[in-house]
Amino acid sequence: MKQYVGLLQQVLAEGEVRQDRTGTGTKSVFGGQLTFDLREAFPLVTIKKTLWKSAFLEMLWFLRGEPNTAFLKQHNVPIWDDWADEQGNLGPVYGVQWRGWKHHRVTPGVNSVDHLGGSVTNFDAKVTETKIDQIKELIEKLKTKPQDRRLIVSAWNVGDVPTMGLPPCHRDFQCYVSNDGYFDLMWAQRSWDLGLGAPFNITQYALLTHLLAQCAGLKPRYLKVNYGDAHIYLNHIDKLTEMLNSCEIIDCKPQLVIKNPTTDIDSFSIEDFDVTGYQSNPFVKLEIAV
């Protein structure tokens, strides 16, 4: 996981100190890309332990399309608790947009023309609200229109951002199918917390790439991230610096095992997955900035 380590080192050496929404402060760089070849290994960070089951559960929660933390609480994953209300509600966050993007369709009624002013009034126009399942539509396109340049899923719904517990840090992803059946996924990360968020995001998007490939009958190949503001919170600097100075990068090639052969994206559970060959340095506890 040399790319992750290299980005940490770059931010620590070159990052600009900036104020942020949480009041904690960060060191930050802007813009770049990391690429992982999933044919070689499943990309788990090894410089510190990644809790991959928790990352997988968060991705499964996204795919459930729920605005509430109940599923995460059921599996003892508290990572969204700080942004939820007392009932666990978060508003229309990631999964809600992925599985139920609201669309308002206007059906014209009868036109009435004002002959004096020439204006047109539409009577009995109907507004119908529908929901778009972006994930289901994506899988269908991967099967039927694999060379489409619109293989995109977005969580950045401008109208809903103000009502989200936390606006999407990973705002959208785009897919690509090669002529020989390989499947690539590239996600856009507007804001990247390198200490806590990045290892999770890499892990869960690698899982998503495998799941979408299996559901569409394709072979997973490249996972890419385009990041915008990549940052280290100031209260993480000491622990991450100590980690980089004291820990060796463990060179291992973890592999994802999917025990469920289903092609139904809604049929996966955490029991369907295992990771073999993963070795890492110890877990590093970092305080979350809310």
Image: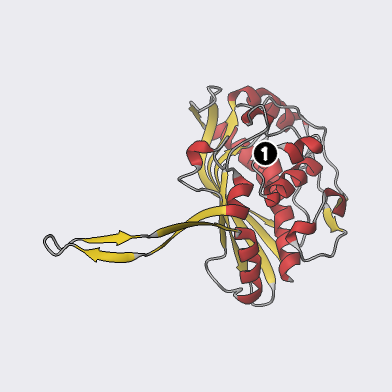
Q: Of residues 228 and 79, which is closer to you in this image?
A: 79
Considering every residue shown, the one lying at the far left of the view is 116
**Residue lying at 77% horizontally and 66% vertically, measured from the top left:** 263
Left or right placement of residue 274 versus residue 149 in this view: right
> In this orientation, does residue 29 appear?
yes
* Amino acid type for the residue under numbered disc 1: Asn
Quick check: 134 above or below 284? below
**Residue lying at 11% horizontally and 61% vertically, measured from the top left:** 116
**Residue lying at 77% horizontally and 60% vertically, measured from the top left:** 40
What x and y, as percent, mark residue 27? 54, 30
Quick check: 157 above or below 266? above
SS for tag 1?
Answer: loop
Please rate how many residues cluster around mark 1, counting C-alpha atoms within 10 Å: few if below 14, some from 14 to 19, many from 20: many
Q: Of residues 84 and 49, which is closer to you in this image?
A: 84
What x and y, as percent, mark residue 242? 72, 26
Classify residue 111 by image quadrant: bottom left
**Residue lying at 75% horizontally and 57% vertically, measured from the top left:** 266
> In this orientation, does residue 1 appear?
no
The residue pinned by badge 1 equals 68
What x and y, as percent, mark residue 211? 74, 60
What x and y, as percent, mark residue 264? 76, 63
Q: Which quadrant, please, contains the C terminus?
A: top right
